[in-house]
Image (cartoon, rainbow, N blue to C red):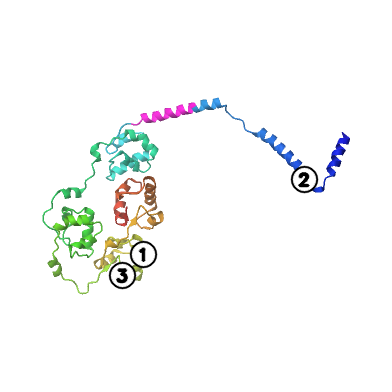
Amino acid sequence: MRKAWLNIKNGFLSYSRGDRVGIITLSVLILILLGANAYVKRITPKAYYTPEQFEEIQAKWDATRQTNKNSGLLSLFSFNPNTIDESALDSLDLPKRIKRNIIKYRAAGGSFKSNDDLRKLYGMSDSLFQHIAPFIVIPKAAVKPQTKNISRLTLETPSGFFDPNTASEEELEHFGFSSYQSNNIVSYRNSGGTYRQPEDLLKIYGLDSATYKRIYPYLKIDVRAEAEKEVPEELFTVELNSADTTDLIQLKGIGSVYASRIIKYRDLLGGFCNVNQLMEVYGFSEELFATVKPAVTVDTTAIKPIRINYAEFSELIRHPYFEKSNVNAILNEKDKNGPIKKLADLEALEFVDAEFIDKIRPYVTCR
């Protein structure tokens, strides 16, 4: 044994120094790998359950899930979302937020024309809709499109003529204008505007060429009476959507500070749609407004509407009429259901109501 060891030792020493270092390094690595292999075998986790036990547990879980699913379906019943009362709605197996949004949407004047309209409700997920879809019953009578006052007016043939410089809102609605258009026509007149020729009506925000062609045969402007009006020689008016600070400071009571605030607020709005919006300018008092109101007009064609289907959060939140809550609701609606086709569809959303829709209507477009 001793002789064998001496032979190995002498043979090892016969190598060069570099060869001896390499042999030692290789030997150490081999020992480390052998030790690591033995350690890994010891710490390898063993299965807690056998394959047969796991299959048995899986089968029990699937059976429990199917039982719960079937019991949930049994608690649903057929219902019409347009007519179901609150007590019956409470007994329906739906999340509370969905029930609340159904009532809120109906209270705002909305109606469900098809089953898919319930998808637009805030909080309605695709899986929940598929769950309740077989129980939604909307009669064909409810699918008829809603008819507003304008549909009644278009069925009747107006008689006589009207002058937009003198007609009241009721008279304008009689000739086929919507209440929104009638209000804008009278507001423009009250703010100092005058209709000198029929085409001037096309300047009114919300009045399209189709409406203009329909009412044109009944339009009659008394040019003679208009010419006979006494116009003060020193009458000075400012159009708010095109005026600069030099124009505004010529108004009585308006200095450079108020002029800068008016232009800054106009830029945030995208243009004034009514002279009464001057009261929204910071620091504008009722006395000052009463002083400047006769000398200002508004050209609504200068308004720059926001394309709501393309607008991002930063663009919407910059507008004075938008808040974080309704901006997030609108953006979530676009992400979930695609482009917004008409503003009325937004009334079903949380944090969005009819008053808000009317307020932003001049400043957004769905195109």
Pinpoint residue 196: horizontal percent, then vertical percent. 18, 65
- Identified by mark 2, the residue type is Gly
Residue 20, compared with residue 296, is above or below; it is: above
Secondary structure, magenta segment, majority class = helix
Residue 70 forms part of the magenta stretch? yes
Q: Which sits in the foreground, 280 or 204?
A: 204
Is residue 344 shown to the viewer in this render?
Answer: yes
- Quadrant of residue 107 within the rendered picture: top left
Reading the chain from its start, which is encountered first: label 1 or label 3? 3
Query: Which secondary structure, mark 1?
Result: helix
259 left or right of 8? left
Marks 1 and 2, how far apart in space? Answer: 81 Å
Reading the chain from its start, which is encountered first: label 1 or label 2? 2
The residue pinned by badge 1 equals: 264
Pinpoint residue 135: horizontal percent, then vertical percent. 32, 33
Residue 90 forms part of the magenta stretch? no
Query: Which secondary structure, mark 2?
Result: helix
The residue pinned by badge 3 equals: 248
- Identified by mark 3, the residue type is Leu
Residue furthest out toward the bottom: 233
Is residue 169 shown to the viewer in this render?
Answer: no
Whether pointer 2 and pointer 3 mark residues with C-beta atoms closer than 8 Å, the reply is no
Taking the spot 35% from the left edge, 35% from the top edge, the residue there is: 132
The residue pinned by badge 2 equals: 22
Pinpoint residue 214: horizontal percent, then vertical percent. 17, 55
